[in-house]
Image: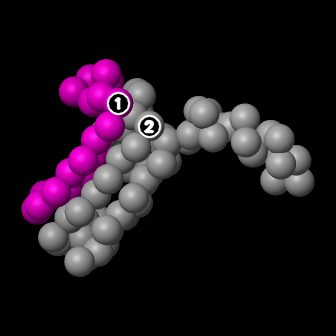
Amino acid sequence: MLIFKNVTNLKIHGLLDKIENDSFREIKAKYINLLIDNYLEIFSQGLEWMNFLNSNLTLNFSDANDITRSLDKAIFVSIIID
């Protein structure tokens, strides 16, 4: 979805109908913050939309340096439930 292609920080607050599976396929955002009032409805539709987040990373969890280097490429998602 090209609408988010050049976004560097995405904050979504309020009500959503759904999150399309490929919504974040090409996103360059470092941070995605979700404060969704109807989070149960959104999450009950599935979490496939998260598949593209950090799909470019492969981590060696036994190598702390590998984890530290990968943080620069990672997308951080914060889901706030109020």
Q: Would residue 52 appear left or right of 33 to someone viewing this image? A: right
Task: Give the magenta part as a residue range.
Answer: 1-21
User: Relative to 62, is 23 above or below?
Assistant: above
- Horizontal and vertical percent for residue 66? 80, 40
Mark 1 or mark 2, earlier in chain: 1
Q: Residue at x 88, y 47 (%)?
A: 63
Q: Is residue 2 highlighted in magenta?
A: yes
Q: Which amino acid lies under the numbered mark 2 shown in the image of this protein?
A: Lys
Q: Which amino acid lies under the numbered mark 1 shown in the image of this protein?
A: Thr
Question: Looking at the image, can residue 54 be seen?
Answer: yes
- Horizontal and vertical percent for residue 67? 75, 45
Q: Are marks 1 and 2 in contact (CB under 8 Å)?
A: yes
Q: Is residue 68 highlighted in magenta?
A: no
Q: Residue at x 56, y 40 (%)?
A: 74
User: Relative to 72, is 50 above or below?
Assistant: below
Number of other residues with Cα within 10 Å of mark 2, as a class: few under 14, some 14 to 19, many 20 or more? some
- Horizontal and vertical percent for residue 7? 30, 28
Question: Looking at the image, can residue 1 be seen?
Answer: no
Q: Which residue is mark 1?
A: 8
Residue 14 figure quarter: bottom left
Question: Which label is found at residue 71?
Answer: none
Q: Quadrant of the C terminus?
A: bottom left
Q: Quadrant of the N terminus?
A: top left
Q: Which residue is mark 2?
A: 30
